[in-house]
């Protein structure tokens, strides 16, 4: 294997300085669980790895007005965080089914987003929570809605000199309920064949679904929101025929491909099944509130 | 261009010069001659290379060696005590027939240790989740789970 160099900046500024120094020859890493595998498979061949693991400024979970998660927070931390399990349970669940314990102990939410796989585990929850990402470079900072961060399979919106530093999540409306469903071939250690997040906000008195957010993973070039399915639900009192109509819309909104994990037809069918299942489960949870 | 790193290995401080591109797995096996940790897939999928870093289970095949700086690392060689008495997990694995070819065993035991150290009384479901990153081609996992259950009672 190529004898790459390995740099460990201690601050964000140092990391940005290395990034501008080495440009295309460098690869930013955190947990490195995707990057090292890609290197061994010869999909990438950097001369230099710039590791962000020792940048403490990127490892935090803060809650003031919004939830702010530093890019270096591991999935294990997210899975176990009381704050996230309470207020953003779909994210805690998604992080908790990613890979294995060994992977989750080092792999980070920032890395999951930057690898930008269409089946990225944390993407559907972050989409339904309408998260934003904060990107930083020596030129300054910018914020993007999470939807705009994914450009294609494996392609993110970072400029060459940018680092993803933070994920911001607004607190959902009170009495929001949701479900995260991952369809895989195994109970663990697998990429999603289809993954779905559903987040519904009901009016406590009328029981009407006032807000619906539905996100689909692994069935399009990027993780996507199923906005047509959302519109079917919003403003309505949900019954079986509406739920089935939402599932139908979701099927039409996705563009799955056939690959080693499943056929396009199967994935499309399962999108409908999982969206309906997610809605029904969320309604059950709401009834218990 | 080698770099010097310092960390704790099985309780003892260690200083070693390493090339920056190496993984913890390579350094453990090839430079420190601790061959208890195995390479199964080299991709973080099988868990045969599991070691504990600051008490947490990680895949050594994906752990860049320079990240070991300042950490406390436990390999399977560090489980028996100084007198050579086996750790309760090791005894339980032997007694329950949880070892056949033995290739997954070091990683499996360390994943179990990480679990029990954090959660002394795990349910079967929690045990299964904790070892879900460790593949075994021989046993079918039942004896492994029983061994971990018993060891957690004796720890």
Image (cartoon, coloured by chain):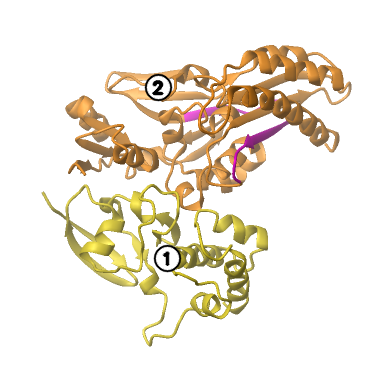
Q: Which residue is mark 1?
A: B103
- Residue that appears at 23% across and 33% down: A46
Query: As displayed, is residue A55 above or below residue B133?
Result: above
State the residue in front, A68 or A162. Answer: A162
Task: Answer left or right for A41 relative to A201.
Answer: left
Taking the magenta stretch, the answer to whether it contains residue A288 is no
- Residue A278 sits in which quadrant? top right
Residue A194 seen by the camera: yes
Kindly indicate whether the residues beneath marks 2 and 1 are on one polypeptide chain. no
Q: Is residue A184 magenta?
A: yes
Q: x, y (%) of residue A271?
A: 67, 25
> How many angstroms separate mark 2 from mark 1 (CA)?
38 Å
Question: Judging from the image, what secondary structure is the residue with disc 2 in?
Answer: strand
Which one is in front, A206 or B61? B61
**Magenta stretch in the rendered image:** A167-186
Quarter of the rendering containing residue B75: bottom left
Question: Which color has been applied to chain A in this rendered view?
Answer: orange
Measured as percent of width and height from the top left, residue A81 is found at 57, 46
Q: Is residue B140 above or below residue A123?
A: below
Q: Nearer the viewer, mark 2 or mark 1?
A: 1
Residue B21 pos. (x, y %): 22, 47
Q: Which residue is mark 2?
A: A155
* Left or right: where A14 falls relative to A248: left
> Is residue B66 left or right of A252 when viewed as pictured?
left
- The kind of secondary structure element at disc 1 is loop
Q: In the rendered structure, the residue with mark 2 lies on which chain?
A: A
């Amino acid at each position: 294997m190529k004898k790459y160099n390995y740099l460990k900046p201690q601050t964000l500024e140092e990391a940005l300085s290395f990034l501008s120094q080495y440009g295309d020859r460098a690869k930013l890493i955190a947990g490195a669980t995707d990057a090292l595998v890609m290197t061994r498979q010869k999909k990438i061949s950097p001369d230099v790895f710039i590791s962000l693991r020792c940048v403490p400024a990127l490892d935090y979970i803060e809650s003031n007005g919004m939830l702010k998660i530093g890019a270096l927070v591991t999935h294990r931390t997210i899975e176990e965080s009381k704050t996230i399990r309470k207020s953003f349970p779909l994210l805690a669940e998604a992080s908790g089914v990613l890979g294995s314990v060994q992977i989750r102990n080092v792999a980070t939410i920032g890395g999951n987003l930057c690898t930008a796989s269409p089946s990225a585990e944390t993407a559907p929850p972050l989409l339904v929570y309408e998260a934003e990402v904060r990107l930083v470079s020596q030129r300054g900072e910018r914020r993007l809605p999470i939807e705009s961060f994914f450009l294609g399979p494996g392609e993110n919106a970072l400029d060459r000199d940018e680092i993803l530093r933070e994920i911001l999540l607004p607190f959902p409306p009170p009495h929001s309920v949701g479900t995260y469903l991952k369809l895989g071939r195994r109970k663990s250690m697998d990429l999603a064949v289809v993954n779905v997040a559903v987040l519904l906000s009901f009016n406590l008195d009328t029981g009407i679904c006032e807000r619906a957010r539905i996100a689909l993973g692994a069935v399009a070039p990027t993780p996507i929101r199923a906005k047509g399915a959302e519109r079917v639900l919003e403003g309505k009192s949900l019954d079986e025929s509406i739920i089935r109509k939402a599932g139908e819309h979701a099927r039409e909104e996705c563009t799955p491909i056939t690959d080693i994990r499943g056929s396009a037809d199967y994935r499309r069918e399962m999108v409908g099944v999982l969206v309906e299942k997610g809605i029904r489960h969320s309604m059950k949870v709401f009834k218990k509130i | 261009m080698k770099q010097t790193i310092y960390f704790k290995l099985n309780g003892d401080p260690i200083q070693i010069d390493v090339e920056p591109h190496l993984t913890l797995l390579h350094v453990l096996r090839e430079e420190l001659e601790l061959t208890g940790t195995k390479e199964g897939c080299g991709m973080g999928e099988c868990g045969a290379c599991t070691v504990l870093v600051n008490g947490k289970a990680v895949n050594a095949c994906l752990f860049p060696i320079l990240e070991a700086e300042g950490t406390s690392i436990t390999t399977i060689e560090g489980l028996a005590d100084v007198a050579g008495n086996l750790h309760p997990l090791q005894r339980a694995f032997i007694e329950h027939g949880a070892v056949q070819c033995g290739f997954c065993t070091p990683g499996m035991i360390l994943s179990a240790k990480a679990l029990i150290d954090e959660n002394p009384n795990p349910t079967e479901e929690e045990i299964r989740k904790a070892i879900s990153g460790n593949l075994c081609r021989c046993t079918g996992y039942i004896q492994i789970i029983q061994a971990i259950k018993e060891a957690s009672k004796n720890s």
